[in-house]
Image (spheres, rainbow, N blue to C red):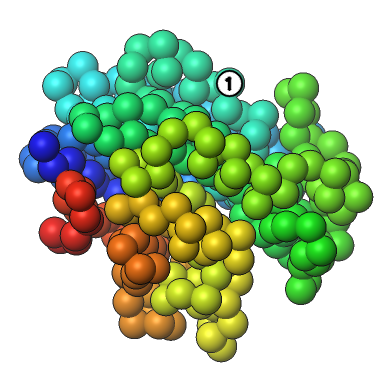
Amino acid sequence: MPLRLLFATDLHGRRAAYEELFARARRESPDAVLLGGDLLPLPHGRAEGLLEPQRSFVRDFLEPALLSLRAGGGPPVYGIFGNDDWAAVRPSFAALEAAGAYHDLHMRRLPLGDHFLAGYSCVPVTPFRMSDFDRFDAPGWSPARPPRRVLLSDRGRVREGSLVELRQRPSIAADLRTLERAGPPGRTIYVCHTPPHGTRLDRMHGGRAIGSPSLRAFLERAQPPLSLHGHVHESPRVSGSIEDRIDRTLCVNPGDSRTRLRAVLVEVDDTARLLA
């Protein structure tokens, strides 16, 4: 049976966009709602105060909203974090996972109908200080604009890190090989915060491509029916398109939902197609 999936990304804690997304999910009854990362408000200020705005957003808004959606017979919600979400906030979703109201896809493969869902939160190293989900793309790769400061969150706090520490973590290429071994890519829908490099989905202002070369190589090799992306907010406006194809794989980046909801409905069977 075909799957109908409602996808949005880069909501950055905008309550009105979430409310509109969940209202659409109730109206259209997709098989699942998928969230492509950068779920939470972008924090500002000193390191010791950076976690609480994201934790309180989950506690005060997102948790009751997701529980209400599920209790009312709404579709399940699956998601990943993005590079503007703190890894230390992931435990705040534990109650939602236990209630079946949210399913974390990062480095996991979960069944849905006749298909599987798999997710990946990490992006090639950015110039920005939040670095929990920044990774070196592959051995020999270096960031064009390395960050001046690296902040990481673990054990419930934000601390100083370094590019050396990021380099010691598994690369995007290594993580994707792990995901590939988890199951049949031909029946798997991938939700990855970074878009693949050199597509109509990863164009910054000026046209520079900042997506992951390793993700592109993975999609060329694995050929899943659908991959869903975010991260590069302006790409749809720069390239003029929210979709591209890598051979048989439909790749989609609808753009951010900071000012208005930009959600897409996708149908997936042996192939994938945008519905709305």
Q: Which residue occupies 19% across, 60% down?
A: 273
Mark 1, Cα crowd under 10 Å, few <14 / some 14-19 / many 20+, is few
Q: Quadrant of the N terminus?
A: top left
Which picture quadrant has residue 257?
A: bottom left
* Image-based side of 37 in relation to 177, left or right: left
Q: Which amino acid is tagged 1?
A: Pro
User: Foreground residue, 81 or 218?
Assistant: 218
In the displayed structure, would residue 17 be above or below residue 125?
above
The residue at the point 27 percent across, 30 percent down is: 112
Residue closer to the observer: 261 or 36: 36
Decide if residue 272 is in sight here: yes
- Residue 270 on image: x %, y %: 20, 50
Asked which quadrant contains residue 160, the reply is top right
User: Looking at the image, can residue 47 be seen?
Assistant: no
Residue drawn 77% across and 22% down?
A: 155
Judge from the rendering whether residue 258 lies leftward or rightward of residue 267; answer left or right. Answer: right
Q: Quadrant of residue 27?
A: top left
Tag 1, which secondary structure? helix
Residue 236 percent location from the top left of the image: 38, 74
- Left or right: residue 205 versus residue 27 is right
Residue 180: where, in percent of width, then height? Answer: 51, 41
Q: Which residue is tagged 1?
A: 91
Residue 121 position (above or below residue 243): above
| Residue sitting nearer the eye, 142 or 92 | 142
Q: Position of residue 76 (x, y in %)?
A: 27, 28
Looking at the image, which residue is at 34% across and 46% down? 186
